[in-house]
Amino acid sequence: MPILGAGVVGDYALSSPTRQFCGSYVGKQHVVGIMLTGDFNPYFRIMHGCTPLDGVYHRITKIEGPVIYEIDGKPIVEMIDELYGNQAWRRQHPVNLLTIGVNHGRRFEESNESNYVNRLITGALPNGEGIGIFEPDLEPGTEIQFMLRDTAKMIESAKRNSAELMEQIKADGREALFGMYIDCAGRTATYSNTTTEEASVVQEVFNQYNTPLLGFYSGVEVAPLLQKSRGLDWTGILVVLAKE
């Protein structure tokens, strides 16, 4: 059963607390959801936008919760210093451009964005001993790659996947009722330094098909990927309900 949703975010600095309406009260750090049933079929696509930096695989050798200290037995902060050629990145929260990626496909085959789960680097620890990531789901021994957030690929992926999804619904003989776009706040033009809002290309596709679209920006996205519902970072999740 597909689970699709989002984690709320208070502000761009990831510092403000969030509030949720939980049916009869206002709370925080809750899971709120609805189960839908009826004469419709759900369709969804995941929009990506990261590419491997160099294709090299590294292994996590020291991690505690959402903090990575070492990869390949070496301090990860020093390795990232070498990648940037300076320590200026340590002042970025979250870190621009660079992310951590886990490839769930085959090693060394041509890069396929749909096989990757990426984790934003929230920043370096004040003492420089490690980096924070947005989810505490990686473990010692996990193979990772350094990934680059590719803004051109991000916009291309959003446009292509939106159009392909609507055409798939049409080819299946169904009518799209409405769509919901859950978009990572980091994909905005302000964060990504783009002249085009990535979500606008999704809007354009839905306008072409005369289908209503709702959406919001999120702190983390949830969708099925490779037979498992996962928390995702720096993605867009497009959900469409369609009837016969």
Image (cartoon, rainbow, N blue to C red):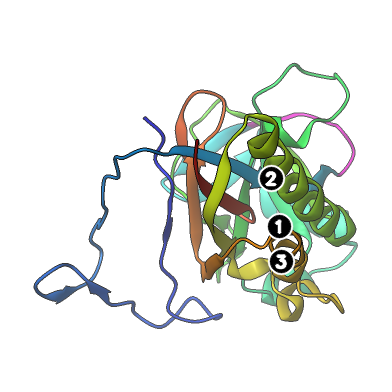
Q: Which mark is residue 209?
A: 1
Tell which of 120 and 61 is nearer to you.
120
Alpha carbon distance from label 3 to label 2: 11 Å
Q: Residues within 10 Å of mark 1 (few under 14, many from 20)?
A: few
* Identity of the residue furthest to the left in this view: 24
Task: Answer with left or right where residue 225 lies relative to residue 234.
Answer: left
Tell which of 67 and 115 is nearer to you.
115
The residue under label 3 is which amino acid type?
Answer: Asn
Tell which of 197 and 173 is nearer to you.
173
The residue under label 1 is which amino acid type?
Answer: Tyr
The residue under label 2 is which amino acid type?
Answer: Met
> Which residue in the structure is indicated by mark 2?
166
Q: Which residues are magenta?
A: 53-59
> Which residue in the structure is indicated by mark 3?
207
State the residue at coordinates (57%, 65%). 213
Element on which disc 3 rests = helix
Task: Answer with left or right where residue 102 lies relative to residue 11.
Answer: right
Q: Are marks 3 and 2 in contact (CB under 8 Å)?
A: no
State the residue at coordinates (26%, 51%). 34
Q: Is residue 204 visible?
A: yes
Element on which disc 1 rests = loop
Task: Answer with left or right where residue 135 lies relative to residue 125.
Answer: left
Discs 2/1, front: 1
State the residue at coordinates (82%, 59%). 155
Q: Are marks 1 and 3 in contact (CB under 8 Å)?
A: yes
| 43 to 185, vertically: above or below | above
Q: Are marks 2 and 1 in contact (CB under 8 Å)?
A: yes
Tell which of 11 and 133 is nearer to you.
11
Element on which disc 2 rests = helix
Choose top left, top right, bottom left or bottom right for residue 152. bottom right
Choose top left, top right, bottom left or bottom right for residue 18. bottom left
